[in-house]
Amino acid sequence: MGSFDLAGRVALVTGATSGIGAATAALLAERGAHVLVAGRDRSRGEAVVAAIRDRGGKADFLTADLGKAESVRQLAREAGDLGGGRVDILVNNAGAFPFGPTDQTPDSDMDAVYALNVKAPFHLVAALAPAMAAHGRGAIVNVSTMVAEYGVPGMALYGSSKAALNLLTKAWAAEFGPRGVRVNAVEPGPTRTEGSAGMGDGLDAIAAQAPAGRTASAREIAEAIAYLVSDAASFVQGVVMAVDGGRTAV
């Protein structure tokens, strides 16, 4: 497998009990990483872990409510313990994506979205990146969205939170890159997951606007993430990679 091989590395994936997170956890495990599957739902998390182990991979589940700062810090500590004192790869995938008019958005939604989409990655990077830097290597990927790049009615809250994450990606690349930690992001387009199932035909309508003309599978997004955390991307730093079927290119 060469430069895509992740054998011997410990990877923490948040929001990994379903969708893109679960697909990413499975793929990183296939490539040799010890994957720490983080999420709120223990039964779903343990199912993801069991599936990875059934295929010969190594995985453990960690419960975390990433909407609370102390729970985020606790997750970082537990991940380090399970990883034998280190975490080599961090995938900040957990996120909330409520849609709706700006004037009908309650303060509680604003607080919850920014707590999960911005503050949780911030706290995890603060807790884990310095140790990566001390070892001289590490890889972080933040999962953003294509609607962080352009305005969409009803997506002001979600899009703005991910736009903040895009800037954090670049700032962290500048901060930790000189010490061997690569920080990048992916911007998925419309993707078929459990979370997007309720969008029905609306998801297909969004997908039809892109050159690819279709929705992505969670595995397709995971492939981009797996590339960015691997040595194949050793010279890729501070990039926000569109994985959207070409939507933001046209």
Image (cartoon, rainbow, N blue to C red):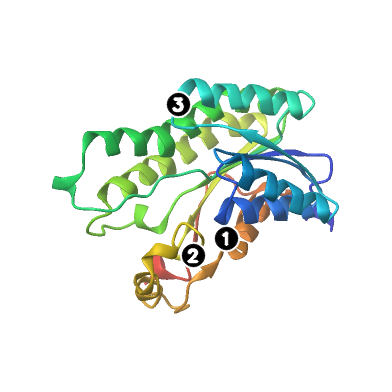
Q: Amino acid at mark 2?
A: Thr
**Counting residues from the N terminus, which is met first, the one under dot 2 or under dot 1?**
2
Distance from the alpha carbon under mark 1 to that under mark 3? 27 Å
Mark 2 vs mark 3: in front: 3
Q: Amino acid at mark 3?
A: Lys
Q: Residue furthest front?
A: 43
Task: Tell me residue 152's x, y (percent).
Answer: 26, 59
Q: Say which residue appears at 36% left-offset and 74% top-offset.
A: 201
Q: Amino acid at mark 1?
A: Ile
Image quadrant where one finds the N terminus: bottom right
- Based on the displayed image, in which of its 4 quarters is residue 204 positioned? bottom left
Distance from the alpha carbon under mark 2 to that under mark 3? 27 Å
| Numbered badge on residue 242 | none
Q: Is residue 99 visible?
A: yes
Viewer-side residue, 38 vs 9: 38
Q: Which residue is mark 1?
A: 221
Residue 149 vertical position relative to residue 234 in the rendered view, above or below = below
| Numbered badge on residue 191 | 2
Disc 3 element: loop
| Numbered badge on residue 68 | 3
Task: Tell me residue 213's x, y (percent).
Answer: 44, 79
Viewer-side residue, 198 vs 73: 198
Q: Say which residue appears at 22% left-offset and 59% top-offset.
A: 153
Q: Say which residue appears at 16% left-offset and 46% top-offset.
A: 104
Q: Say which residue appears at 21% left-offset and 39% top-offset.
A: 106
Task: Tell me residue 248's x, y (percent).
Answer: 39, 65
Mark 3, other Cα within 10 Å: few <14 / some 14–19 / many ≥20:
some
